[in-house]
């Protein structure tokens, strides 16, 4: 058995332990970060069903289209491989493998397409269908040393790209898309595959999930960059800002509050703390400064194979933080029609607090 | 009402007609090509629910997270917009909007994440949940003039990138990834956003959905490129090959058979023909030449906003071709351990046959 197969075999074994505790008979996983985590298999979600099935006991199986089946050869020591040809029904094939599934409890990973779930619900006579998140969260949210090393490398390379970007790029008179291309190129040069990139200028920075557009950056405006890149499947996620020319007093004030909130999270996180209290660390700073109503999102999210994953740092989430959890620390203040400010770092929970994987400077950067 | 809103309003009206005919009470659509088609809204699928709900009669609604809601302002003339904040449940919000949904038939678009469908099934007391594909296929598979113009531009730009690629790139001694980056750059320079790119050398070309890797291209080998790029959301999809140095007699023979099969589709397609007969046009050529067992996939798929979409050119699909359907014509022969050959063009069904949107040469190209 290869060392890769040992890693994935151990993960599947832990899934089966969770299934035993939760009385789940089958776990179904289709192409997604969950499939990469459990099998190292990076198939794309498509209309052709690929499905990993893990029974509570015994050997897992995978159903895969014939034209992709040769890519599974290196996992054949872990799996019973069932190939379907173009004129066969993969849904019926799954039904036969689970022998009809009468009375079973079946968990399905969240990103499986509904078209497949509806088909499976019609084919398999299960007693209960449920989300697999409870099972998979327990494994995925705590990162091992190898995963943290990949996240660290992704974050350090992203910081380096940012540093070169602010030192070499001119902003005024160019579009958000144009300057975004510069940043993308600097990510690519460091071997990162850009997973997302928001370039939001002036009033657009007040829209937290703005779609980068053709707006021309003006003198006297901030530009917000929220971006990340993958390194061996693991992604970075950082937000930094530049200001073209001298900022206003209001910008200085808002920026300082957001930075204090960002630093309060890093200083205050402790293992065992409920996720909702992490949100509160930042929210209290912003609320006490009088901007609470303008901090319109949670302070952060888990991050690893997915840019957003469990656990979420949001009011109502009582999940306790464990050592090895990686999450974004990204408070923001958004003044509609004027500007927004967000500062974001990736943190990892340690034995006695948290460490930031991002080190790009957080001071106000004035550019041309 | 803006002209964009008129286009999307008309599409939603046609959906409501289909719903009436099929006795469907609500259609739910989450971020995907379906949402772009119906609303021009390119949100990313994420753990935060965005859901367009279309009732059989009356005004549609959309449920969206507060931090993205400002992006919906330009569609406010078409929609009742319901915003949820970070600590609210969007699933419960949908339940309230449909007033519990007792006894309803609800169609859900295929790419909606199962995590959301399972939540909705727990919240809403519907009588029946079904795939929305039957409804949406009728609209999406026939392209209007504007859509065909975008697909034509994407295909022509992709052909031009290919032409420059074969004229300027050296292959022998470089990796699949390296030469793939050259092709990607030529796509980007033409304003296309590469949606996928397979670069498969030597024996890897026999794996139809090969994942491009670090293999070094050798003298005497073919390299298969299957790639596409987006232009205003609409994608191209073409497959061409190069051969480093002189090909073997076997390669010549297989290549000629695949090319004949590819040309047989273009020559034989007629409006009204069942999709499975399109597959047969190519399969008969390859089978008669003695390679039937090595043509291990359908001959093609619909294409537009998605690289793969309805209708599929596959045995068993009796859907008749309509004028304006765009689909890939991509027969292949795959000799495990040796090489594979595939030649692919995008075709559009016309009043009296089909037109190819790709014009890059299909002769064997010998490169260094």
Image: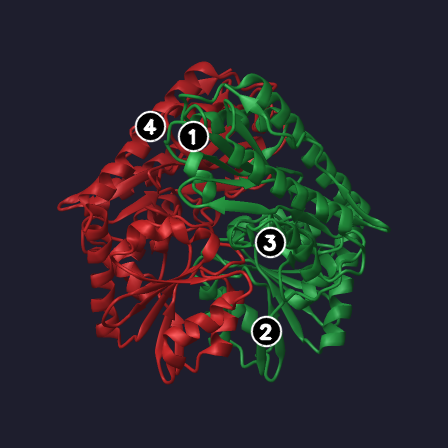
Chain colours: A red, B green
Label 3 crowding class (10 Å Cα cut-off): few <14, some 14-19, many 20+?
some
Label 2 resides on the chain identified as: B
Q: Residue at horizontal 59%, vertical 18%?
A: B167
Mark 3 secondary-structure assignment: helix
Q: Give the foreground label among 3 and 4.
A: 3
Label 4 crowding class (10 Å Cα cut-off): few <14, some 14-19, many 20+?
many
Residue A270 in percent (x, y) is at: 19, 49
Label 1 resides on the chain identified as: B
Res B236 visible? no
Return the residue at label 1.
B177
Mark 4 secondary-structure assignment: helix
Query: Are the residues flagged by discs 1 and 4 from a single subunit?
Result: no
- Where residue B287 is drawn, which disc sits there? 3
Return the residue at label 4.
A157
The answer to which image quadrant residue B58 occupies is bottom right
Q: Give the foreground label among 1 and 2.
A: 1
Residue B90 in percent (x, y) is at: 50, 64
Label 4 resides on the chain identified as: A
Question: Which sits earlier in the primary sequence, circle 3 or circle 2?
Answer: 2
**Where A269 sits versus A199, above or below?**
below
Query: Are the residues flagged by discs 2 and 4 from a single subunit?
Result: no
Label 3 and label 2: CA atoms lie apart by: 38 Å
Query: Are the residues flagged by discs 1 and 2 from a single subunit?
Result: yes
Res B351 visible? yes
Q: Give the foreground label among 1 and 4.
A: 1
Label 2 and label 4: CA atoms lie apart by: 45 Å
């Amino acid at each position: 058995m290869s060392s890769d197969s040992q890693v994935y075999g151990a993960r599947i074994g832990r899934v089966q332990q969770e299934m035993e505790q939760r009385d789940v008979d089958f776990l179904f996983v289709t192409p997604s970060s969950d499939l990469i985590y459990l099998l190292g298999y990076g198939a794309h979600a498509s209309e052709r069903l690929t499905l990993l099935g893990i029974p509570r006991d015994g050997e897992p199986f995978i159903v895969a289209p014939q034209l992709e089946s040769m890519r599974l050869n290196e996992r054949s020591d872990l799996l019973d491989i069932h190939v379907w040809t173009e004129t066969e029904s993969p849904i019926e094939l799954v039904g036969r493998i689970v022998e009809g599934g009468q009375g079973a409890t079946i968990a399905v990973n969240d990103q499986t397409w509904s078209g497949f779930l509806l088909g499976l619900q019609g084919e398999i006579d299960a007693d209960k269908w449920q989300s697999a998140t409870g099972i998979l969260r327990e494994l995925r949210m705590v990162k091992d040393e190898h995963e943290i090393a990949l996240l660290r490398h992704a974050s350090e390379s992203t910081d380096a790209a940012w540093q070169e970007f602010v030192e070499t790029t001119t902003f005024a008179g160019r579009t958000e898309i144009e300057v975004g291309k510069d940043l993308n190129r600097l990510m690519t040069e460091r071997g990162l595959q850009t997973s997302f990139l928001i370039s939001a200028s002036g009033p657009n920075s007040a829209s937290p999930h703005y779609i980068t557009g053709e707006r021309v950056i003006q003198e006297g405006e901030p530009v917000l960059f929220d971006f990340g890149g993958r390194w061996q499947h693991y992604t970075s996620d950082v937000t930094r800002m530049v200001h073209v020319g001298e900022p206003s007093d209001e910008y200085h004030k808002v920026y300082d509050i957001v930075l204090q909130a960002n630093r309060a999270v890093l200083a205050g996180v402790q293992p065992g703390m409920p996720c909702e209290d992490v949100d509160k660390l930042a929210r209290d700073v912003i609320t006490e400064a009088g901007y609470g109503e303008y901090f319109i999102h949670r302070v952060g999210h888990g991050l690893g194979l997915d840019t957003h994953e469990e656990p979420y740092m949001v009011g109502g989430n009582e999940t306790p933080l464990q050592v090895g959890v990686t999450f974004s620390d990204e408070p923001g203040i958004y003044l509609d029609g004027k500007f927004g400010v967000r500062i974001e770092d990736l943190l990892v929970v340690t034995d006695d607090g948290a460490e930031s994987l991002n080190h790009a400077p957080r001071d106000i950067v004035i550019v041309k």
